[in-house]
Amino acid sequence: MADGPDEPDIMTDNAISAGADPAFHADVLAGFQSRPRAIPARWFYDLRGSELFERITDLPEYYPTRVERSILGDKASEIGTAVGTSRAVVEFGSGSSAKTPLLLEAIDPAAYVPIDISGEFLRESAEALSADFPGLPVYPVEADFTHPVPLPVAIAEMPKLGFFPGSTIGNFIPPSAVDFLRAMKETLGTGAMLLIGMDRVKSADMLVPAYDDAAGVTGAFNLNLLERINRELAGDIPIDAFRHRAIWNDMLARIEMHIEAVRDVRFSVAGQDFAMERGETVHTENSHKYGPRDARILLRAGGWTVTHEWTDAANQFALILAEAQPERTAP
């Protein structure tokens, strides 16, 4: 097979599976054609990817979930007082909603709206949470939450609390993070509140194992992207020709995840041919880490003003409460 062309060919109708997302199709082809190669991390989360990520959160090396849960538990009373009651909780990228019960118990909400791109996983999680909170209205929304999302009419008049745990904001490069925070503000409205998790900068000795665990679960999660491409985009990528890599980029204060070719390899995706040499990578994810001032500046740039902040005793992770402010054109 020859190297992939600079411009995409016209696809035939049967080149990809009937259920494939056109945006996934476009991002994957663009990602393999670009230099350096990169595919957005949001495409990790098909059903299998979502299940693998939930396994990652329970790994001994993966401290963020464990530490964030401890903050939610230890500071529940303070969080409840700061947020108040009777808000509609809108969770962006809800996944399994594993941390959500701690928040819901603390604030006595009026409704819960989980938003996630993985529809099947979203519905399963929403049903499980509804069983645990039988009196709480739950309105799952399947959507790409990185853009403004129309919320259910039933919560239109309720005050809202956005919930974005897990330091998922770190997956975005800073300009994209600001755009996303602005999209959150547009979704929730001026005057809404946002409770967001942000991971702190710390030593590479702690960070790298959190993204390259001994059991290989994170590696399977990363390589599952190739399996999804094969399944949904008529790919023939040999999975054994690639390995997972996690790298600490100190200059940019982020963990980078890559899929690296372990040998020269040729493959096709959706009717287009590609080749990669040994050692070449596809950049699949970033996880930026933020100091306290960095986090406040980022939120401020996105239209949010910090009102409260809670951390663990070792200051490894922060939960930050912010309020959506009206647009300002002057200091």
Image (cartoon, rainbow, N blue to C red):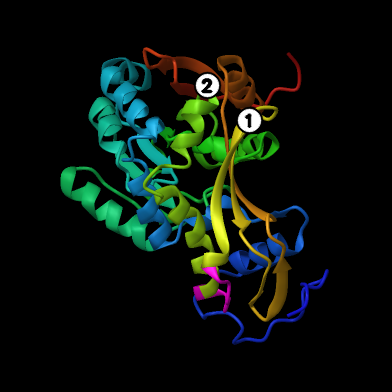
> In what quadrant of the picture does the C terminus appear?
top right
In-front residue for pair 263/116: 263
In-front residue for pair 176/115: 176
Q: Quadrant of residue 299?
A: top right
Q: Which residue is mark 1?
A: 302
Disc on res. 30: none
In-front residue for pair 133/328: 133
Measured as percent of width and height from the top left, residue 271 is found at 67, 81
Q: Is residue 22 above or below residue 123?
A: below
Q: Which residue is mark 2?
A: 202
Q: Is residue 237 magenta?
A: yes
Residue 311 left/right relative to 329: left
| Disc 2: CA contacts within 10 A as few (<14), some (14-19) or many (>=20) | some
- Look at label 2 and name its amino acid: Lys
Q: Is residue 22 magenta?
A: no
In-front residue for pair 324/287: 287
- Look at label 1 and name its amino acid: Gly
Magenta stretch bounds: 231-239
Report the magenta stretch's main SS: loop
